[in-house]
Image (cartoon, coloured by chain):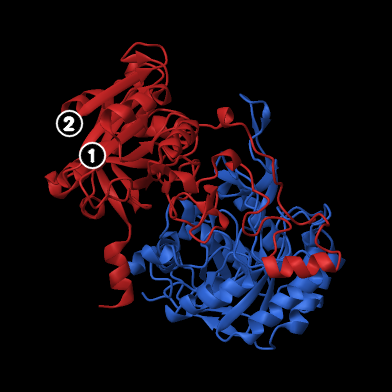
Chain colours: A blue, B red
Amino acid sequence: MAVDLRARLGHVELPNPIMTASGCAGAGRELAQFMDVSKIGAIVTKSVMVGPRSGRPTPRMAETPSGMLNSIGLQGPGIDAFLQRDLPWLLSRGARAVVSIAGGSVSEYADLASRLSDAAGITAIEVNISCPNVEHRGQVFACAPDSSAAVVEAVRSRARYDIPVFAKLSPDVTDIVSIARACVSAGADGLSMINTLLGMVIDTDTMKPHLAGQTGGLSGPAIRPVAVRCIWQVREALPGVPIIGMGGVRTGRDALELILAGASMVAVGTTIFHDPAACARILRELEEELADRGIDRLADVVGLAHQAHAMTGRALSPNARVRRS
Amino acid sequence: MTQSEIDAQAGPVQVRGTVLTVRRVDAYYAMTLVAPAIAARFKPGQFITLAVGGPDSSMLLSRAFCIHDVRPDHGGTVEFVFAVHGRGTQWLAERRSRDVLDVTGPLGKAFPLPRDPVNCLLVGGGYGSAPLFSLAAKLRERRCEVDFLLGAGSGDRVFGALTARRTGRTATVTTEDGSLGSRGLVTDMLDQVIHDGRTDVIYACGPMPMLRQITLLARRYDIPVQVAVEEAMACGVGVCMTCVLPVIGSDGITRMSRSCVDGPVFRGESVRWDDVGTIPFDAFGAPGWEPRSRRASQLQNGQGSSADPKGGKPGRGRSEGERPGAGGGKHGHGG
C-alpha cells in the first residue's frame, strides 16, 4: 500500500515529513554522499549567522547514555558564504532548503531574514532562538516569552511573506506553552521543538568538566520523552499550529511517536552521526509503520494521540496488519 | 554521467560489513571486515567509522579507526586495529565471524605521495603505526626507501614491529619501559634516524604530543612532515564539527578545520600545535575576529576593542597531557 506522506510546512507542501535537524547535517553536502538529499522532505541547515564564527574550543562533545552533549558554539562561515556556496548547491540538487538562523541580537536575526528573503529558493526559515551554547549576556532568547517574541517578530517582518517562519523552542523553560504562544502571536507560522537540553559531564579522572565549554546541549534518544511531552503540550494548547518535531528520533517508529503527539514533520539529528543515511532509512521505516497500521495518509495521524480512544475507532482495524500481507 | 554518480564513485560509502576475523595482536585487536566497496576506494591514511552496540545501542557516536590494510580476498576486505578503551571498543572486541557491522568509509584525506623516489621515514606511536604499512607499500611502488621508527609505552604496545623489520630498509623501535628496542620516546631517536636514513620526507601517526615534537624537529632540518592527527570525532563525515583543530590554510588564515574531512592528514607545519584545544584569537571567525579592512574601520570608531559577548572562550586550552585516547591511530573518542 502506498502511503500519502505529504506534509505541510505552513502553506508549503513537502513530499514527506522527514528532515535533517539543524546542526546535524551541515548544509547537506556531506550527507549527499550517502543519500539523495532531494528525496527527504527538507534539509534544515546548520544555523547560519551574520559573520563567520570559529565556535568553541575542543573537546566539544561527550557521549552520554543514549545521548551526547555538544558544545560547538555555532561554528560556521556566515551568511555570505552560505548564500554563495551552500544554498546554490542545495538547490542544484533539488533539495528543499529550510535555513536555520542564529544571532546575538534581534537586529542580527532581522538582517539574516532579509538577506535570505533576497535569495531565491528558500523553503522556510527556522529561527534558532534556543541554542543553549550561545552566550548572550548569560541569557538565551528562548527562555522568556518576550525575548522569543521579539526575535520572531523581527524575522517575520523582514522575511518575504511567502517564506514560512518556524521558531525553534528550547525545552529548558518552565512553561513551553507560554513561549510557544508568544512566538505564534509574534507571527511564527510554526514551531520546531525541541532543541537540546543543557547538560554537563565531569571527567572523574581529570576531575574537571569534560567539555571545554563546560556545559553542552544534550541530544539523542535520551531526550525523546521530553520532546514528546513538549510537542504534546503545545499541540494541546495550539492545535492549529504546525510543528516540526525533533528529539532522539532513531527509527520510523520514533518518528511516528512524535507525529502522534502532534508533529506534522519530523527532523532527525544525532542519529545521523552513526548513520549518515538515517533520514532516508527513517522515511522508509515510517512509511512501513503507517502501512502496517492500515494508515494511508500521514496527515490523518498527526496529533492523533490527543483524540480519546484513538486506536479503537477509525480505520485502524485489528486486521490492518493482515490486510497488508 | 551525472554529478551524483561521479560523487558516488569518488566518495565514501556506507555498507553492511561482515566480520571475517577478530584477533588479538599483543595489546590490541585487529578486525577484518568484508567490505569490497570500501576496499576498492581505499588510499593509505584514510579511516572508517563504525556504529557500535547494535540497533538499540545506547552508544550513539561513530567509532573511527584508521584502515590498516585492504586485501582482495572475499571480494575486498578492510582491516583495522583498535585498543579496548571503553564500552564501544569492548563491544567491538566481542564481535565474531559473520557478525554484520554498519561501516562507513573510506573517509578523510589520504597521505600525499612524493613524485620522486625519495627517502621516507614513517613514524608511529602505539597503534598509530597501523596505517603506515599500506603507505609503505605504496611508497615502495614508487621506488622510495622506507625507514620505520615505531614506539610505545611497552613492547606489547608497539604495533607492527616485525612487519616493519621485514619490509622497511631499517626499523627502529623505542619503548618507554625499555622492553623492546631502546628505552625512550620515538622523538628521542628521531635525530639519529633522520641522519642515518638521509630522510627527505616524514610521515607520522600517533598521539598529538608526538606529532607536535616531530613537526618541530623536522622543521629544524627543513623536512616536510605529513601527520595523521587524532581528534575526538562524533560522526567522521564532516557534519558534527566536534573534531576541529586550528590549521593554517594556504592563504595564511587559521581556520578551525575538521580533522575528519580536511584531515586526518595535514602538513605538520600547518597545524598550530600549541593552540590545539583552543580557539586562537586570530582564527577565522574567532570572537572579535573581523576581516582586516572592517577591523581597521571599526577601530577608528572605537568599537574594535570591546570583548565580544557572544563568542567562544579563547585560550581555554588544556595541556596536551590531558588529551584522551593518546594511544595513537584511533580517531574515535574514549570508548
Q: Which residue is mark 1?
A: B136
Does residue B84 appear in this view?
yes
Snapshot quadrant of residue A78 = bottom right
The structure residue drawn at horizontal position 25% and vertical position 42%, both measured from the top left corner, is B135
Left or right relative to A8: residue A283: left
Q: Amino acid at mark 1?
A: Ala
| Marking on residue B9 | none
Mark 2 or mark 1, which is nearer the start of the sequence?
A: 1
Left or right relative to B72: residue A222: right
Viewer-proximal residue among A20 and A73: A73
Pointers 1 and 2 within a single chain: yes
Snapshot quadrant of residue B275 = top right
Which quarter shows the N terminus of chain A?
bottom left
Chain of the residue on which disc 1 is drawn: B
Pointer 1 with pointer 2, Cβ within 8 A: yes
Q: Indicate the secondary structure of the residue bearing disc 1.
A: helix
- Crowding at label 1, few (<14), some or many (≥20) Cα neighbours within 10 Å? many
Question: Where residue B303 sits: x, y (%)?
Answer: 84, 64
Question: Where residue B304 sits: x, y (%)?
Answer: 80, 61
Q: Amino acid at mark 2?
A: Thr
- Crowding at label 2, few (<14), some or many (≥20) Cα neighbours within 10 Å? some
Vertical side of B256 occupied by A290: above or below: below
Q: Indicate the secondary structure of the residue bearing disc 2.
A: helix
Question: Where residue B13 sits: x, y (%)?
Answer: 31, 57
Which quarter shows the C terminus of chain A?
bottom left
Left or right relative to A156: residue B143: left
Question: Where residue A130 sits: x, y (%)?
Answer: 72, 60
Q: Which residue is mark 2?
A: B167
